Image: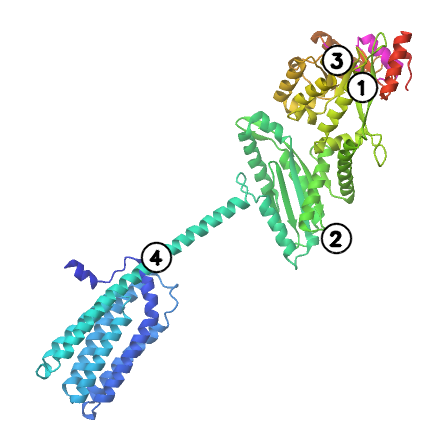
Amino acid sequence: MSALLQIFRLDTSDADLTRAQFQSFCGHIPLLYAILVCNTLAIVFYSFEPSQILQTLIAPIAICTVALVRARWWSRQSETRHLSDAQITAHLKRTCSAAIVMTITYNAWVIWVFQDADVVSRSNLTFFLALSQVSTVFCLMTLRAAAMLVALISTVSFALYFAWVDDWQLLPQALVLACVCAGMVMVTLSFNRSFSELVKSREALRLRQLETERLSDENRRIAFSDPLTGLPNRREFLARLDAIEADEHHCLSTLAVMFIDLDSFKEINDEHGHQAGDELIRTIADRLRQQCPEQGVLARVGGDEFTILLDTSKTQESAQPMAVTLAMRLLEEIALPVTVDSHVMQVGGSIGVTANIDASASPRELLRRADLAMYHAKTQGKGKIAIYSDELDKGRLRRLDVEKQIASGLRHGEFDVAYQPIVDTHSGAIVAAEALLRWPRRSRGELWPSEFISIAEATGQIHSLGLFALERACRELRPLPGLILSVNVTPSQFRHPSFGVSVMEILEKTGFPPERLKLEITESFLVTDPNRAIRVVSALRAKGITFALDDFGTGYTSLDYLHSYGFSHIKIDKSLIMGLEPESMSRMLVSSAVSLASVLGMQIIAEGVETPAQANILRDLGCHAMQGYLFGRPMPLEQLCNRLSSCRARGRSGLRQTSS
């Protein structure tokens, strides 16, 4: 029984369904009242009697007036967004009540007219009444409660009245209408169920669409933002540059780009761990974000790299002065200490700045120029600002050209090896020779090592060049018994994964004794990657190769380094030798180095010796060997062999030899 009664109750528990029913009524109800008015006018046409003016004219006019007023109201409710769920529910409840009242009123009026009508009019009355009932039910199908109440009231009143009137003559019509109404009830229930399912499925689809959009937005946020800092990432930054370039109305001369790279960040990461490094990056990013002006776009484009795009099109300010001023402020912010887990960390910054003053460059080209200026700033020292100029590009193009020439030079045998003698301080005999790479047969003229070694280091070609020099020197000096071969190894070579294996392969291939090979390494590699340095040095020392610490006195070498790596020699940098005088600070430093080496069981080699006075001081201090222009410039193998033979034949000190 409760299930049956539920059919006639208005269900407003689903707000989406209620709103959908209301929206459907906005089109159906005006049509319903239009049909009702037409049927009413048709009944008036067939049954009008001047003597019955109240029931055949005034009453239908009142019904039509109410119908037209309701139709007009519903036709104006096409926009439902301004209505709340409570208001829509109230309107639907009033619709159910109005449907009941209008159905009872309309049926009562037809029965009232029917009583005094003739046979033809009665036939028309029953037809139009049945037509109105069917139309009303179908127009109210989306609102189950209203449709079922109308069907129930119409069918019961029609059947009860027209079944017994006129001696049961209209009983067949009453039964047929009852069957039709029963069919309409079944159709209404089925349609209402389908309508409800459609609304629910549409809502489910809308929710899935919202979820899809949310996931899409989340994916876009992940794809275009840096997860650590929340800043736009490189992809997003490039997309903004492309959008500016695609905008034909955007003035490109108002753009400036800054490229920021943190100095010494790798060392902090290695020493304190990635978690501390991440916290440092977040702190620096927050500082940059606070300083970035409203017309700027800050992005993190790499591990410790940030960019800022300045667009002064709305402020009419000059982009370059604004960028330089901002860069100076950012350097101060970056340099402020950062405390992470009670550890105070500090980094610096190198910033490249470029402005599109003449609007000649695309936004992406500005990014490249700022990147190039940043690298130039790094070469000038830490905590610097560099402004892009055409000269930087000329230098870049020259470096690219030299890079290509290095590869070609190795293939065509343009490189050679020169040797600079190292003499014993007391006997003057040549005890070793340092192999130095030269490029004498370059197609565009000889290039000095200072011009191509740094390029080879930056591009990784130094590994091939270094192995070439080592193999050539081992082959050429192997026939000279007792002569130590000293080879300088750059940090880039040492970092190469196969460096140690390659050295041993060359020694095996050339037959050069490992105990005659001495590798010179700088302390910069020891500081940046101490664990790897210990592994490589230990493995090669086990084969008999000795090591010398090069450029001693220019860095921060500690006793721990000297002890841990097992160096056999310390090579004093020529910068200390240049100022070497009897009572100078350089003399005190060299004396300390000699004493330190003596305690550690190492030998001291002084490089850059150019005068007999310097040689005498070094001899008095106890220096073991010397190298410099006083004893010979870098020379070809043939000249070295002649010098070696001459010194051995005469048995005289090499100290009296002049520069060759």
Q: Which residues are magenta?
A: 602-624
What's the CA distance linking mark 1 and mark 2? 58 Å
Three-letter amino acid code at the position of disc 3:
Arg
Residue pointed to by mark 1: 476
Disc number lying in front (1 or 2): 1
Which mark is drawn over residue 358?
A: 2
Three-letter amino acid code at the position of disc 4:
Ser
Would you say 454 lies left or right of 189 here? right
Say few, some or many: other residues with alpha carbon within 10 Å of mark 1 (under 14 / 14 to 19 / 20 or more): some
Which mark is drawn over residue 201?
A: 4
Q: In this view of the protein, which residue sits in the foreground, 103 or 406?
A: 406
Disc number lying in front (3 or 2): 3
Say few, some or many: other residues with alpha carbon within 10 Å of mark 3 (under 14 / 14 to 19 / 20 or more): some
Q: Mark 3 or mark 4, which is nearer the start of the sequence?
A: 4
Residue pointed to by mark 3: 516
**Relative to 104, does residue 584 appear above or below in the rendering?**
above
Q: Is residue 77 magenta?
A: no
Judged from this view, the residue extending furthest toward the left is 167
Quadrant of the frame with the N terminus: bottom left
Q: In this view of the protein, which residue sits in the foreground, 105 or 159?
A: 159
- Circles 3 and 2, Cβ within 8 Å, touching? The answer is no
Which mark is drawn over residue 102?
A: none
Q: In this view of the protein, which residue sits in the foreground, 180 or 9?
A: 180
Disc number lying in front (4 or 3): 3
Q: Mark 2 or mark 4, which is nearer the start of the sequence?
A: 4
Please provide percent x and percent y for residue 219.
49, 46
**Relative to 396, does residue 121 appear above or below in the rendering?**
below
What's the CA distance linking mark 4 and mark 2? 59 Å
What's the CA distance linking mark 1 and mark 3? 13 Å
Please provide percent x and percent y for residue 303.
60, 36
